[in-house]
């Protein structure tokens, strides 16, 4: 690796360690273990393999980042685990997701409902559209509490107030009776987080939670999520296309491309010593504080057409280090160190 | 008498229509209520010519109105339309009696339409492009396109003629029967004669409501907050009723309002087929016999109903959607 890269990597890992305070650097099969997940969509243009043989695990209390550009399958992976994919046109074609000894992909719908929102909660990208406009914030928070904790409305309401306090919303008693349209984007995302955490889930899936927010609000929300993770001991599965977000909040990173996992490693490894040419490309797109007036080098080409992927490696068309064999044969994921996996012929 | 007639037939229409324009409905308030068109103003003789000799039979039909003040104070402006030529009763009483029946029929028809229509729409939207969806929407398409009078006749033919489940035509009688539930009992009304007309009248609105519910629900079901609700673990049924249906209500309420006003105002065909003593039939009869006071009263009443129903619909919006507030 280049000297500059390593310098940058050290900076980031230092900041990461200060935020994290976690020791789960070992790839966990502890809490949730996804193995060989395949999610396909049957569309007019043909079969779209949105998620193709994705495996990774999440440890208790860890913060895992899943990065990739739009359409790389990171959201679909999460939605598949939550079983929120619309079938048809979607189809979960294979794999397993073991959570506390149960395979989430095979649970009956009624059992799955007890997991959703209760043990695995999810927050979404755009807080402006993710809250029901006709229900008060309180009613929406209480809905999950009444459902999962079997509380009476009045008790649930008190829990709701304490949740709003937890996510640092001022005047929580009054805010419970407000409608979403009376709140700002940042406030609504806080409400979403309060709603997701109201049943003390063991995993919080955050699907690009800050993409639709202002930069200052982004920082607040990320800090809030990190704080809550430390306080409650839940695991956070952070889906993002922003490597900055990953560096700030996560301990381990999964890099996805075209529905496949390209590389898995700790934040330090990924930023300090990226193995896959795609990861290297992603990092060189980032602006840097330590290098002045350097042109950014984008990854050449376009994200692939998911209906017509190359026969070999999906990244081959854009790869600067592509070899002849890359066009013909698809690489398998290979373990290249403890908790370190990469899908590339360079590391075979 | 002569100058009065000129005033009545020619003048002051503009002032009166200014009054009506305020309601944004163009009802021609001339005071022809008191002058039948059977009398024509003749330029040469400068007098009224009694065309059919009706004036001599009904001398009070040509009660003179006199000055402009009298015209502005025309009773018709104040919803007093005088007496019917044919029935020799106060128009107020005729309208009251017949509108009562039409309102009753319309409410029953609309209840059927709303319950069945929203039900069918929800079922379709929950499983779009399924067999049930295609079946429901084909039925709705047929319902919309069905000529009301034909449907009414066919229902009579089937349920009265072939099956003999229903007897009698016209309003019939409302009976009360006792329901005994052990500890307490109560009375429920039963009105056999309203069933077929109500189904006939309700079919078109039912189909329109079903189609509107389906499209509105399908739109809402793809929105982010529905996914949020599912991610919370809310059951499918609760997602549909609490989150999706409530959010699709605004366009549904709009069509219900418009259809209800239409039913209240114009159940003409159904009432004629079933000999229902309602307003629509009363007005058709009045038109046939050129009984102008009733026709005018009917038109004004229709306009009034439309305005009121739209007002109620607008107020309902605010109850459904907290974002809508009227200052």
Image (cartoon, rainbow, N blue to C red):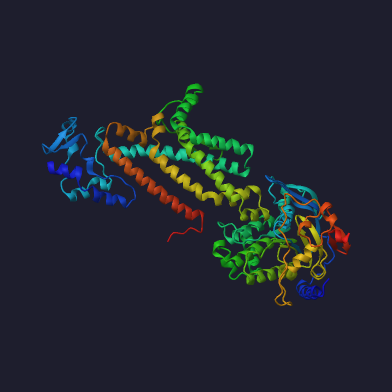
Q: Classify A120 as above or below B87.
A: below
Name the residue: 13% across, 44% down: B3
Q: Nearer the viewer, residue A293 or B77?
A: A293
- Picture quadrant of residue B97: top left
Looking at this rendering, what residue extends furthest in the front direction? A324
Name the side, left or right, on which B313 lies relative to A76: left
Specify whether residue A139 is in view. Answer: yes
Residue A62, can we see it? no
Q: Is residue A189 left or right of residue B113?
A: right
Numbered label tally:
0
Residue A32 falls in image quadrant:
bottom right
Q: Nearer the viewer, residue A139 or A289?
A: A289
Rendering coords of residue A332 (x, y %): 85, 55
Q: Seen in the image, is A6 located left or right of residue A154?
A: right
Q: Quadrant of the C terminus of chain B?
A: bottom left
In which image quadrant can residue B91 be found?
top left
- On the rendered image, what quadrant is the N terminus of chain B found in? top left
Image location (x, y in percent) of residue B306: 38, 46
A216 above or below A49?
below
Q: Position of residue B62 (x, y in %)?
A: 18, 38
Determine the residue positioned at 71% across, 72% down: A295
């Amino acid at each position: 690796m280049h000297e500059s890269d390593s310098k940058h990597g050290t900076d980031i890992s230092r900041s990461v360690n200060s935020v994290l305070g976690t020791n789960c650097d070992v790839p966990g099969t502890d809490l949730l273990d996804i193995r060989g997940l395949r999610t396909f969509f049957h569309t007019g243009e043909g079969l779209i393999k949105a998620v193709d043989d994705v495996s990774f695990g999440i440890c208790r209390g860890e913060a895992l980042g899943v990065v990739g550009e739009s359409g790389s399958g990171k959201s679909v992976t999460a939605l598949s685990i939550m079983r929120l994919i619309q079938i048809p046109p979607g189809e979960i074609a294979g794999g397993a997701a073991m959570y506390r000894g149960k395979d989430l992909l095979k649970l009956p719908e009624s059992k799955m409902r007890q997991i959703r929102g209760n043990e695995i909660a999810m927050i979404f990208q755009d807080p402006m559209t993710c809250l029901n406009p006709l229900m008060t914030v309180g009613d929406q928070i209480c809905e999950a509490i009444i459902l999962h904790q079997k509380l009476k409305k009045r008790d649930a309401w008190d829990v709701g107030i304490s949740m709003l306090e937890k996510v640092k919303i001022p005047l929580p008693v009054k805010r419970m009776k407000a409608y979403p349209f009376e709140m700002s984007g940042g406030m609504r995302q806080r409400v979403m987080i309060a709603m997701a955490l109201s049943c003390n889930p063991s995993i919080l899936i955050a699907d690009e939670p800050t993409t639709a927010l202002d930069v200052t609000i982004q920082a607040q929300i990320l800090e809030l999520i990190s704080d809550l993770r430390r306080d409650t001991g839940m695991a956070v599965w952070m889906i993002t296309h922003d490597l900055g977000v990953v560096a700030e909040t996560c301990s381990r990173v999964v890099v996805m491309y075209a529905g496949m996992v390209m590389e898995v490693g700790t934040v330090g490894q990924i930023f300090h010593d990226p193995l896959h040419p795609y990861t290297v490309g992603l990092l060189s797109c980032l602006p840097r504080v330590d290098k002045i007036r350097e042109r950014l080098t984008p990854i050449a080409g376009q994200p692939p057409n998911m209906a017509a992927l190359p026969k070999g490696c999906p990244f081959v068309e854009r790869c600067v280090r592509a070899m002849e064999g890359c066009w013909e044969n698809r690489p398998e994921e290979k373990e290249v160190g403890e908790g370190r996996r990469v899908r590339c012929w360079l590391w075979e | 008498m002569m100058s009065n007639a000129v005033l009545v037939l020619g003048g002051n229409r503009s002032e009166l229509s200014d009054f009506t324009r305020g309601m944004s409905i163009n009802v021609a308030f001339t005071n022809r209520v008191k002058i039948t068109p059977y009398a024509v103003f003749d330029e040469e003789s400068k007098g009224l010519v009694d065309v059919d000799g009706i004036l001599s039979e009904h001398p009070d039909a040509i009660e003179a109105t006199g000055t402009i003040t009298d015209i502005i104070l025309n009773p018709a402006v104040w919803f007093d339309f005088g007496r019917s030529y044919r029935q020799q009763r106060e128009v107020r009483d005729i309208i009251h009696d017949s509108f009562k029946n039409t309102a009753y029929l319309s409410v029953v028809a609309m209840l059927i339409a709303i319950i069945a229509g929203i039900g069918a729409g929800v079922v379709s939207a929950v499983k779009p492009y399924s067999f049930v969806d295609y079946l429901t929407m084909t039925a709705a398409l047929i319902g919309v396109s069905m000529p009301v009078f034909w449907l009414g006749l066919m229902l009579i033919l089937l349920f009265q003629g072939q099956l003999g489940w229903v007897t009698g035509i016209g309003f019939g009688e409302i009976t009360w029967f006792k329901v005994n539930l052990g500890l307490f009992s109560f009375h429920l009304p039963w009105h056999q004669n309203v069933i077929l007309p109500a189904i006939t009248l309700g079919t078109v609105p039912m189909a329109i409501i079903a189609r509107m519910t389906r499209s509105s629900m399908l739109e809402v079901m793809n929105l982010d907050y529905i996914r949020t609700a599912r991610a919370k673990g809310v059951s499918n049924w609760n997602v549909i009723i609490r989150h999706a249906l409530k959010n699709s209500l605004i366009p549904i309420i709009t069509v219900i309002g418009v259809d209800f006003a239409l039913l209240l105002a114009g159940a003409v065909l159904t009432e004629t087929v079933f000999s229902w003593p309602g307003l629509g039939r009363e007005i058709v009869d009045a038109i046939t016999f050129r009984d102008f006071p009733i026709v005018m009263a009917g038109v004004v009443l229709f306009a009034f109903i439309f305005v009121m129903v739209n007002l109620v619909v607008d107020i309902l919006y605010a109850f459904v959607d907290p974002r809508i507030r009227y200052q």
